[in-house]
Every structure is written in structure tokens, then in C-alpha cells.
Amino acid sequence: MKRLYFFFVFLSFTLALAAQPLDEIPYAYKLEAADTAFARLDYYNAADWYEQCYKENRDPAIAKRIAVCHDKMRDYSRAERWYGRIIEKDTSDELVDLKFEYGRLLKKNAKYDEAEMVFNELAANDKAMAYKDRIENELVGVVLARTLKVPEDLLIESAGNKINTRNSEASPAVDDQGNLYYISFDQNDIIKVTSKSEDYHAKIMQARKSEKSGYNKGKAISDKINRPGYHNSHVSFAPDGSRMYFTRAIAEGGEVTVSDMYYCDAERGGWGAPQPITSLNGNFINKHPEVSDLFGGEVLLFSSNRPGTLGGMDLFYAPINRDGTFGSPVNLGAAVNSPGDEVTPHSDESYLYFSSDGLPTIGGFDIFKSEWDGSKLLKAENMGKGINTSVDDLYYTPGDNDAGFLVSNRDGTRSVKSKTCCDDIFTFGKKDIIIKLLASVFEDETPLPGATIKMYQKVAEELGFPDVQKNEEGNEFTFALDPDRAYKVIVEHEGYYPDTADFNTVGVRESKNFRGTFRLKPKPKETGPETEVLTIYEPIRLNNIYYDLDDDKILPDAEPDLDFIYDLMTKYPDMVIELSSHTDSRGKDNYNLDLSQRRANSAKEYLVQRGIDEKRIKAVGYGEKRIINRCKNGVDCSEEEHRQNRRTEFTILEGPQTIEVRKDRKTTPAVGNQDDNGSASLDGAPILEFEKSEINLGSIKEGEKKKAVLKFKNVGDEDLVIDLATACECTTLDWPRKAIKPGESGEIQIEYNSEDKEGQQDVTVDVFANTDPMVTQATFSVFVEKIN
């Protein structure tokens, strides 16, 4: 089965269990709900239920299902993290299929260096021989991503909110009157499917050409064509406007089970009754019908997984006879088709345009063109950056004057969930002015070849996907820029410290070149890994094991530290340890004692589930008995000071007297000079410490905005420089651009927009700075009152 139109619709099917509080639902019921949702291809609910299950049982099979769900929903960032979590534990390199998908997700997230490393590891793995050709293909795509450049005069813009919603739009086609037809669910929210649901299917929309500019708001065409109960899609027109083509599909969840092609002839005042193309339809998927005259006569191009394909979906053509009937389908061959999927064909007098994920791409689906030389189609060429991105690009539809439409889930897309979940329609054309960044990389005054520059566009204070270039031979780079945009540049080179710069093109109204010179400093040569000694009876703090407030569940970030203990206990089978948990002084003594015991038990249970004998682990909750700083009962302390006391430690009770381990394991002797993330304070480093890392904004009405301030101080002994502060799209942030000297304070300004929000909202603010670790987090909460 295939993904629905190659974009995802967010359908949420109502489940009876959802009415109960989650903590009252037994694990077996949660797992059954997850499996049921997954089986019906309801990935939205399945992911939610599986993640609830994973909190109680760190089963790799559940982690895989979560990764698959996020991938199917095109949440590439979350899918990458979950696949990465699985791959980290695959010490035997057996999971080559999952590792391949992990590499592809890294590429979709524009992490080309990491993707290249994964694909090279697979290429060297004899167990991955079945993936050999696909691995080579992906590595070619990585090279393309680094070497291709965005055309300086290319302008790509969203078709606007009159056309695009927060769900997906696709299949732009212009009729002979200049009106835009396209496909939409015409919904701005996740679509909840119940027995009383209105029709939630995709419809063919028409946006009439505006006399002033652009298009009017789109409206669904008649039910005669938009048949209720079917996804009506993939609209196109014969060149003379005499016939409209489209498909009708049945889908389960987000995947197609039936898809047939139809046409209807133009009649006075509208369109005639739709007719199925019975000679081409069958027990397979048929999509994207499009008329072409490339082959010396009128033919119907389409995409299908019928027998005779080279892979998944291939491109075919069928001759259109003089009486309007259709001849036998012909596969377009290896010049365009691949072992992957080829979709969304379109042609003009010289070229066939289409999208593929089986040819070398810089991301997911890329747009290609194949030239018709009068007798055959030549080998397809990638249309390059700008037209293509690291994510999915489809439906390339050129028009007059080098302008046209395409469909993508790139930066700038309106999305109902993750930023890559949904497709929008974009226009492309040529810029009136040319803006460029001309960058040079040096070591002191010497040109430095081999650097990589990542150019990020800032969208609503968030970094988008980068335009990545690597120059192996020289030190000069050229990037095309858009007007009225903010950018961040990161310059990297192996063996050197990175350099960054921020700038914008706001107000630029004529062609201009920005010039940037970057001087990288070499890192000291490594002398091998540093080690430290763990001693029997000495408590060792585990840096990454912390908990949600008033909760005893181990968070996913704790797994590396617990896996470290597991590795030690496996290596030293006579080792017996104490796992101890500690709380801060807030709350009642007995409650804190019980909470810390439950937290210690959770850590122990994780290790026991992995096979460690429970007799070798003594789990002890000390509550607030062992405060490591001044913050005892009644003392007014900052949140950071309290968090120093909320910790988990392990102590060797029996077995080896001393153990030498690498320092980068980040275990730390249990003392009181640690920062918010549990890392020891370092000499010669800035430390960002919030006055309060958790703030409550109170209640506001839906649609209102609320401002607040996060105050912080540099408690380190070097200048603190904040590169970026980010949160959800609903939050605007402003932060100091100048360096904060040791001992000085600063503020991060918050403005929260409650539009389309309801109920309790918890928002995390990530602050990227020159600290170690690089990211410091704070959170704020707000309750949004629904307006009836």
C-alpha cells in the first residue's frame, strides 16, 4: 500500500479508552489500543499510545513502532530520534534495515555529514549487501546536497493562506480560463473521525483568478465530481481544456488501498459525468493522470504499481485514440524509473518533469526532468537546490515566463502538527533583485579549503533546514539569499572550532552582495581519551537521570547513564551497587522519602528488565536527608539550587575496588558544584543559570497574548553568548545579542500567542549558547480558557 497522495492527512480516530485518565489504564490495555490503532494505519493515535507504553516498558519493539509512526506522519525529526535510539543499542549491527531508514531521515533533516557516516558504515557491513545499490544512491545524493547551489535568481513563495491550510494541499493545475484547481482537505485542524463525522475526504478545489492579483479563496467543486466517501484528487486538464482528469481513492488511515483514474468532458456551463478509465484501471494503484504530446501524439501519463514496474510506483503512458479511448500502457523505462517510486508527471514541449525517491536525491522526493530528443527520453537530471530541498518536493508544474507551481513540505509550510507533516502549494519564478552571500574561510591569513558552510533561514525565530555547501578544493562560497529574511551561518571544518554569524536582508530593495570572512581556529591535537577512577563506596552522580516534577518515571534521556551501569555490571559480574535517589527539601518529608524510593525502584527496574539480577542492586530512596547545598527546609533558594539536590547516584558496594572509565561517560563525584544538567562546573567556561527555570503565566482567554520574562545570570567565569532561543511556533522570543560577562544578568523576553490553543499548555524554551552543554532549558505553563 502507498501513502495517501504522498502527503499525510491527520485523522484521529476516537478510541473508547481515551476518556479515562492515562494513569488508570492498565499497561496491557494501552498496548492493545496502540496495536489496534497501528493495524488500522491510525499512526496519530498509535504513536501516542506506544509512547505511553514505552514509559512503562523500554521494549525495543515498541520504540521501533514509535519510529515508524512518526516517519509515516512525516515528523522526520522525531522519527530520526527514535530510530537513533534503537540504532545506538544495536551493538551487533544486525538492524541494517532500520539503520538505512535512520540514514535517510538524517538526510531529510539535512544532517548530511551524519547521514554519510551511517551510509558508509552500512556499505562496509556485509549484512547490508541487499542494500548495496540503494546505499550508493544515497551517498550520491549526499554529494549532490553539498555541491549543488540554489540559483541566484530563483524565487519560491507560498501560494498563500487563501489556498493553503494547516493540513495538506497538492496537485495544482490551471484551466484554460486561468483558474487554479488543486486538492485539499480544507481543514486547519487534526481531523477527528467519529461515527457522526462530516465528510473528511480530500476534494478538488477551484480558486478563481482574481482581477487584482493572485487567486480568490478556493471552494470545492460539485459533488458530481467530488464523490462523497472517496478521496478525489490529482486533477489535470487536456491542453485544449476539453477534458479534466482526476482520481478517486479509498484509504485506510494515511495509506491508499484503491485508486482509479477518471475523466469528464467539458460541457456548456461545466463538466459532464465522470467516466472511469476502465481499460487502465485494475487491481493496482493508478495515480497522477496527465496529458502529454511528447511522444509524437497525445498520450496519458500516469503513475502505477501495476505488474512490470522497476520498483514501487513507475511512470507509464497510454496512447489516447482519436475517439477518446486509451491504448495499452507502456512503461517509460529506466531513463526515468527506478527501484523506488516515481510520481506526479508533467510535461511541456521538451521535457518530462516528475518526482522520485529512488534516483539520487538531496532529501526525500526530489523533482527531476528528462529531455525528449525526438525519439526517446534521455537520462533524468536532478533539478537542483531551490526547486528541491532536504524534504519532499512534488508536482512541478511550469507555466509561462519561467513561473509555475510545485508542492512541498519545506520551510514556510503551514502545518497542523510537526513542521514537515503537511504539504503546501508554492509558486516559483524569477527574482527582481539578486542578493548573495560571498563567504571566504581562512586559518589566520591562509585560505582554508575543505570547510562546510550551513546557511539557515530563521522562520519565526526558529532555524529552518540548512542550505549546505562543502568546498573541498577552495575556500570560497556563494549563497543565494531572499529579501526580508534573517539568516544564521555556521562554518565548520574537521580539526577546527566552528564559527558563526547572524545577519538579515530586511529592507534590501536592490541587488546586493553580502561579504563574510570566517577565520577558524585549530583545535588542540587529541592525546587520547581522558579517564577517571571510580572507587568503591564513593557515590557517583548520574548526570542525565532526572525526573518530571512529582513523577518517578525514568525519562528517555536517562537511558545512556543506565546503560553505562548495565555495561559495568555485565563486565564485573561480582559487582553489587546501591542506586540511591534524592529529592529537594520542598514538600513533606514522608512524601519525599516515598517519591525518592519509587524513583530509585524505577532505575533498578530498568536494569533488571535488561537482565541484571535484582539481588545485585540495592535501591534506596533518601528523600531530603542528604541535601548537598544550603537549601534545607525553610531556606529560600533558586530553582537551580533545588535541582542540584534532585539527583540519582550509584555506589559500588561489592566487587572491584577501583574502575577506570572514560571521562566522556560524564559520571561525576557527588558534590554540590553542579549545574542544572548535572555537569560539574568547569573552569574557563560560561554557565547560564536561570533565576527561575519554571514559571507559570496563569490563565488567559483563547486568542490573547501574554508576555513574561526569564531572568538569568552568567555564574561562570567566561563571557556568555546566546546564539539562539527557541520554543514552539506559538511563542516569540527575544534575547540579549551582546555578550553577558561573568556575574552579569540578562533577560529573555517571552510573548505567548494562545490562538488555536485550549487547556493547559506547557512550553519548553531551548537556549543555545557557548555553554557546556550547549542547550539550557526553561519551561513555562499557561492555561488557555476556551471562548464559546
Image (cartoon, helix red, strand yellow):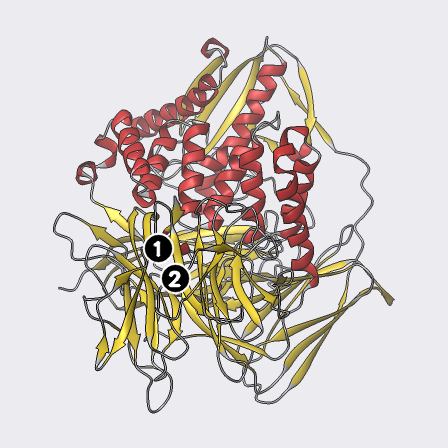
The number of callouts visible is 2
Q: Looking at the rendering, which quadrant does residue 412 occupy?
A: bottom left
Disc 2 + disc 1, Cβ < 8 Å:
yes
Percent x, y for residue 451?
A: 76, 59
Q: Nearer the viewer, residue 596 or 625?
A: 596
Percent x, y for residue 548?
A: 38, 39
Find the residue positioned furthest to the right.
Answer: 446
Percent x, y for residue 174?
A: 38, 77
Does residue 518 appear in the picture of this structure? yes
Q: In the image, what residue type sits under mark 1? A: Ser
Q: Nearer the viewer, residue 425 or 16?
A: 425
Percent x, y for residue 497?
A: 74, 55
Q: Residue at x 52, y 42 (%)?
A: 677
Judged left or right of residue 716, residue 278 is left
Q: Residue at x 38, y 53 (%)?
A: 286
Does residue 736 appear in the picture of this structure? no
Q: Looking at the rendering, which quadrant does residue 671 occupy?
A: top right
Q: Is residue 500 above or below residue 486?
A: above
What kind of element bears circle 1? loop
Placement of the N terminus among the 4 image quadrants: top left
Q: In the image, what residue type sits under mark 2? A: Phe
Give the residue at mark 2.
Answer: 326
Answer few, some or many: residues within 10 Å of disc 1's Cα (few below 14, many 20 plus, some between 14 and 19). few
Placement of the C terminus among the 4 image quadrants: bottom left
What kind of element bears circle 2? loop
- In space, the residues marked 2 and 1 are separated at their CA atoms by 7 Å
Q: Nearer the viewer, residue 284 or 128?
A: 284
Give the residue at mark 1.
Answer: 279
Judged left or right of residue 544, residue 163 is left
Answer few, some or many: residues within 10 Å of disc 2's Cα (few below 14, many 20 plus, some between 14 and 19). some
